[in-house]
Image (cartoon, helix red, strand yellow):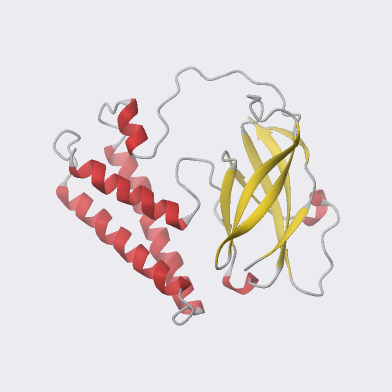
Amino acid sequence: MSNQSDWLPRSRAEQLAMAGDWISVCAAKLTEWNIPGSALTELTAIRDAASAALEIARSETTRTPVSNARCKEAFDALTGFMRDFKRRHFLSPPLLDSDYIALGLKPHDSHPTPSGAPTAHVMVEAYLVGRHELGLRMAYVDGNPNDPANKGYRIWYKAVAPGEAPPADPDADLPKSFFTKRRKDVIEFEYGDSGKTAYFAVQIENDGKKGNWGPMVSALIP
């Protein structure tokens, strides 16, 4: 799993929605932003291919390891193209804040807020999203969610098969992680992880400074 801390949504549904917004907004801005029509046509085709692959991979009748792999390849192509599209066409023209918001991007902040070391404790509340996907909601055990020191969340996790010993120490037993700045996010597991139990623990991160561990929680991977 990639470590995403930037503008690209983690959920495939949200990635498709963002691509759709880009297509709609850019169709009206081709001349103003000097975007080649061929680039928008290619984005549309890649978005449509990813949407079709996701539908096949989620269907009970067509879902197989092959369709799951093809879905991943289609979304790798979509997100890779979107990153390149943003770099080529959204950073050069003088976009207004309203343009960034319409594209689903965060306007540039020229006045960063100073912050100190994080002190809050956070735990994950997991909920079902789709096959091999769990939604994760950050729940504050203590501390102020609006404290500028709480800039992001490092979510550590491990998928444990039935009969395996559950992790006891997050420092030693949770080997995988990803970083997010969102209070709600989505984690996608491998095809073979379905039926396993995922264990999670969270540390708040802020410019290299790490907070204390939140409580370890678990959820069944669909």
- Where 67 falls versus 142 (above or below)? below
Closer to the camera, 58 or 40?
58
- On screen, residue 27 versus residue 173, left or right, reads left
- On screen, residue 167 versus residue 43, left or right, reads right
- Where 62 falls versus 125 (above or below)? below
Q: Quadrant of the C terminus?
A: bottom right
> In x, y percent, where is residue 122?
73, 40
Closer to the camera, 43 or 132?
132
Closer to the camera, 67 or 185?
185
> In x, y percent, where is residue 145?
66, 30
The quarter holding residue 162 reads bottom right
- Where 208 falls versus 133 (above or below)? above
- On screen, residue 209 versus residue 3, left or right, reads right
Furthest toward the left, the residue is 31
Furthest toward the bottom, the residue is 61
The quarter holding residue 92 reads top left
> In x, y percent, where is residue 69?
47, 72
Q: Residue at x 63, y 47 (%)?
A: 137
Q: Residue at x 61, y 18 (%)?
A: 114
- Where 60 falls versus 202 (above or below)? below
Q: How many marks?
A: 0
- On screen, residue 187 versus residue 25, left or right, reads right
Q: Quadrant of the N terminus?
A: bottom right
Q: Residue at x 69, y 36 (%)?
A: 204
Q: Residue at x 45, y 57 (%)?
A: 12
The quarter holding residue 90 reads top left
> In x, y percent, where is residue 134?
60, 59
